[in-house]
Amino acid sequence: MKLMLILVLLIFSVMIVVGTLLINRVSSYFLDEFSTQMEEVFTQRFLAELSSACADELAPDRLREMLDAYTGSLGIDANRDFYILSSNSGEYLTGSNDQLGVNLEITPNIIQALNGQIGTGLSSANSYMDIAIPITGDAGTYILYIKDNKSDLTELTWMLFSVTIQVVMFGLLFSVLLSFLLSKTMTTPIENITKSAARLASGEFDNRIEVHSDDEIGVLTQTFNNMAQTLRDTMQDMEAERNKLNTLFLHMTDGVAAFDAEGRIMHMNPAAEEMLGIPFSEELLFEDVFHEVARPEGDGTVMVDYSVEDRTFQLFLATLQTPDELQGVMAVIHDVTEQHRLEMTRREFVANVSHELRTPLTSIKSYTETLMENENLPTEMRSKFLTVINNESDRMARIVKDLLTLSRLDNGRLDMKMSLFPIGKLMGGVYDAILFEAKNHGHQLTLELDDPLPEIEGDRDRIEQVVVNIVANAVKYTPDGGNIIMAARNVEKGVEISVTDNGSGIPKEDLPRLFERFYRVDKARSREKGGTGLGLAIAQEIVRFHSGTIRAESQLGVGTRMTVYLPARQGKTAH
């Protein structure tokens, strides 16, 4: 009786403690998972993009569109919603659930966000999990609020509580029965083997039976333990091999798809889904995945070029078969879009270089032959011809110089003299250098600088070359009498340099190619003004070297805005 009472109390205590710890651990896990998920989504880069979206009166709608694109990463579902609130009163503006948003409770995290701080407080005592993040942009400040009603946690907690009660009751009953079975010493070893066999069948290969004797039951027990050890080692080896294959298929950059003998899909890794734009479904057939591609036959491999929209792939198709029959088809998908694009770019670049050099060479040759064949040309005409030859030679020299600069940038061989320098003084120097040329065209040139501006760590001359190139382009290609604004603004972790003009603008279809080498929007007009078509390409490479970005925005008939972002030396500012 005492043994039965001890077993009952022991099992009851253990089950209660384990159940309580399990429920508390599940609650902590949900809170930690929520915090981790929010940290992974709201990175510094994404917060910067959200701040950029707050640029006009449509900021709430733009923020909602951006958050809609992250519903999967944020875990937005029937129990979790996001809301965009006013930073002044916490009033609901828009979100994923308008019905709940109208009557949204002002939580401590929202109050913290209203004070300009990120609200991340979580408590297992609350009936919800939430986070409030203030986002500031040009159009004002808004609060991004994510709230989870913890329905999943509540359901799981009740389920665990129910399971714990059931386990406790089962443990009590088991302890009572075990106390009686202890008296049956003859049947105990066999019952132990039976129970261990059941655990082994459920996958518990680590279970071992203690051997108490050397008789037939002891031998049977030892044999059973050896069998369990062998099964465990075998299953571990199989699991390791399977994990290796799964990891390989999951993370390899090439797409892989496998089909059975009837053409039904058996496996498709994420790379294949992304490349083909087709989510995995057990109903898919070979013909649904690869249109107009014939399944291979025999024991060989087939390589096929295959295109999906603007992407080009190479398909390597191989049959899977035993000596007796065909088992299926394996397809390996290799994305060669970039190789094709680089090949086209290389050919276009060679053609552009040849064309750019052939034009001045043709002019030089023509005028030189004319001078050689006509010794009695008038002095004025001879001087004019020589001037043309000199100008075309200078143009060729500029092209070659720019090509050498690009080559050195591409190969990392261009010397950069890195130092700290005030960006404000650089902008002022460029302004003074360009002002006379701008006035010759009747332009109004304006310089706008934030005070203070951060110091930039980089090659001052190269950064100045970028700014001069952009401003000079604005002066050259803006009709006389235009307005040009040079500006340098403080932005997060850096400075933004912009040059805005009210010229004729750039067609929308030309903007993506504006930084390509030798690309000109108006080729005849660019050559007439002495451009080589390489200035913006060089500027882009210099900015990239300094870990910055350069972009162009333009609208026909309105004007163009060129923007350069450069990271600042942290903790340093200069006037």
Image (cartoon, grey):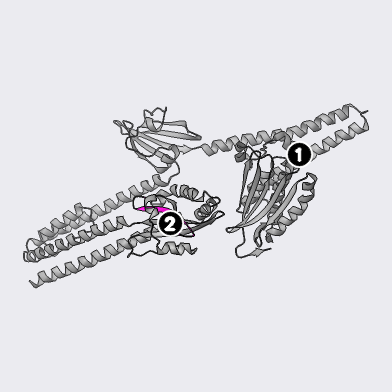
Residue 96 is covered by the magenta coloring: no
Element marked by disc 2:
strand
Q: Nearer the viewer, residue 118 or 331?
A: 118
Amino acid type of the residue that numbered disc 1 sits on in the rendered structure:
Lys
Please, which residue is most extreme toward the bottom here?
Answer: 2
Position in image of residue 100 (x %, y %): 37, 53
Q: Badge 1 is on which residue?
A: 529
Crowd rating for badge 2 (residues with CA inside 10 Å; few <14, some 14–19, many 20+) = many
Q: Nearer the viewer, mark 2 or mark 1?
A: 2
Task: Estimate the spatial distance between the alpha carbons at disc 2 and disc 1, rounded to whole Å.
Answer: 54 Å
- Residue drawn at (54%, 38%) of the image: 339
- 478, 295: nearer the viewer: 478
Instruction: Tell me the quarter of the image containing the C terminus.
Output: bottom right
Start and end of the magenta stretch? Answer: 76-91
Decide which of tag 2 and tag 1 comes sooner along the chain. 2
Taking the magenta stretch, the answer to whether it contains residue 89 is: yes
Q: Position of residue 293 (x, y in %)?
A: 42, 28
Is residue 188 toward the left or the right of residue 525 in the image?
Answer: left
- On screen, residue 494 versus residue 28, left or right, reads right
Q: Is residue 532 visible?
A: yes
Between 369 and 140, the residue placed more toward the observer is 140
